[in-house]
Image: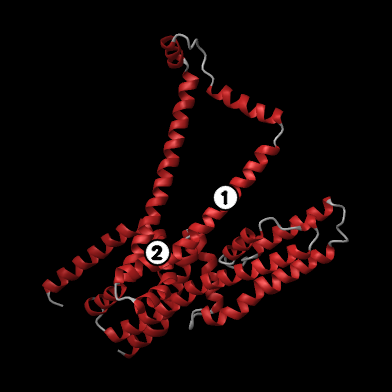
Amino acid sequence: MDGRNSVWGYYGIVLAVVLFMLVAPFRDVIAYSLFVYYIARPFYSVVRRVTQWKMFSALFSLVIVILPIVCIAAYTLNIGTIEFAKYAQSMPDDEKSQYVEMITDKINVSGDFSDPWSSLSGIGQDKELISSVLGLFNQSLGYFFSFFGFVFNVFLVFLISFYLLKDGGKLRRSVFENIFYSQRVAHVYFNEVDKALYRVFFGNILNAIVTAVLAIVVYSVFNMYAPVHLQLPYPILLAILTGVASLVPMIGVKLVWIPTVVYLAVSSFIADSLFGDAAYILVFLAAVNIVVDMIPDFALRPFVSAKGVNTGAMMLSYIFGPMVFGISGIFIGPMILILVAKYVSIVMPALRKG
């Protein structure tokens, strides 16, 4: 490499460092974007066979992915509103009056409101009230910026996923042609990484969907035959939570069925029929473990696990990822493991030969 090429090489390294510093704060957004991209890609491929318009295909595929999430969130919010209304109606009048008095005490302002200027003067001299108002304002401002940041991150996830669907092929060809000297090795490496990430991410969502569907069946059948005091409230929502819990490594649906079994046992104890209801609880426990937990895992795991990646190492990546990167580590951990595993199995042998 001559002097001019060395300068350009060092300049490229500087640009790479600057680019890394630019995108590093958004690693969570990038991880979620890749997750959404791999979920939406099968739908994008199907729509692209019908229409040649890439923009429409990408938008429609993302809508297919996002719409169920919005419906689930709306359904959950609706149930929360109903339960809160029931609680408010069942609250005794004296307890309601206590809450009202507490609120009025918080916002009470001394002064004669027949004289507004005097009242305003009283407010200005009430340091405790001013401090409370400023604290409430700062807290509200913090909530606003948190909500705005959440909406902005969701928009970035949607935007990045959209362009990955629309222009991902062009980006890959550009990387092969302009960055890597050995295009053959790069092509094999990134194709294998892409296949592994697709199997892991889309497989996890497929496993969650199958788990939720089986949970709906199990919970609904249980409600048909169980006594009234053992009826599961909102079985559909409980099944959705079971499917979401299946994404959590190691623990999975245990996050749902353990509290549910405790709820059934407590309900049976309150009804003074614990021994009589033991058979229902044991059948529920067996059905959840076998039908909801074990069947999806054994049936789908061979088809959705990353080939060439050790299962134990993959499980550890699901554990260490969230410990290092937070919630997004559920996706970042497997990404890093797949990148490293494919590098060891594809690139290093090529380097030894070359």
Name the image quarter holding residue 351.
Answer: bottom left
What type is the residue that disc 1 sits on? Asn
**Residue 255, image x, y percentages:** 64, 61
191 shown above or below 264: below
The residue under the point 26% across, 65% down is 16
Q: How many marks?
A: 2
Element at label 2: helix
Residue plotted at (44% across, 31% down): 137
Q: Nearer the viewer, mark 1 or mark 2?
A: 1
Q: Amino acid at mark 2?
A: Ser
Check disc 1 and report the residue beneath it.
Answer: 78
Left or right of 347? Residue 81 is right
Say few, some or many: other residues with alpha carbon within 10 Å of mark 1 (under 14 / 14 to 19 / 20 or more).
few
Mark 2, Cα crowd under 10 Å, few <14 / some 14-19 / many 20+, is many
Give the image quarter of residue 162.
bottom left
Q: Position of residue 109 (x, y in %)?
A: 51, 17
Q: Earlier in the sequence, mark 1 or mark 2?
A: 2
Residue 82 seen: yes
Q: Residue at x 42, y 50 (%)?
A: 150
Camera-side residue: 278 or 174? Answer: 278
- Quarter of the image that includes the C terminus: bottom left
Q: Residue furthest front?
A: 50
Closer to us: 331 or 61: 61
Which residue lies at the image location 79% right of the left edge and 62% below the top edge?
A: 226
The quadrant in which the N terminus is found is bottom left
Q: Which residue is mark 2?
A: 33
SS for callout 1? helix
Q: Is residue 31 visible?
A: no
Q: Position of residue 31 (x, y in %)?
A: 41, 64
Q: Is residue 247 left or right of residue 169?
A: right
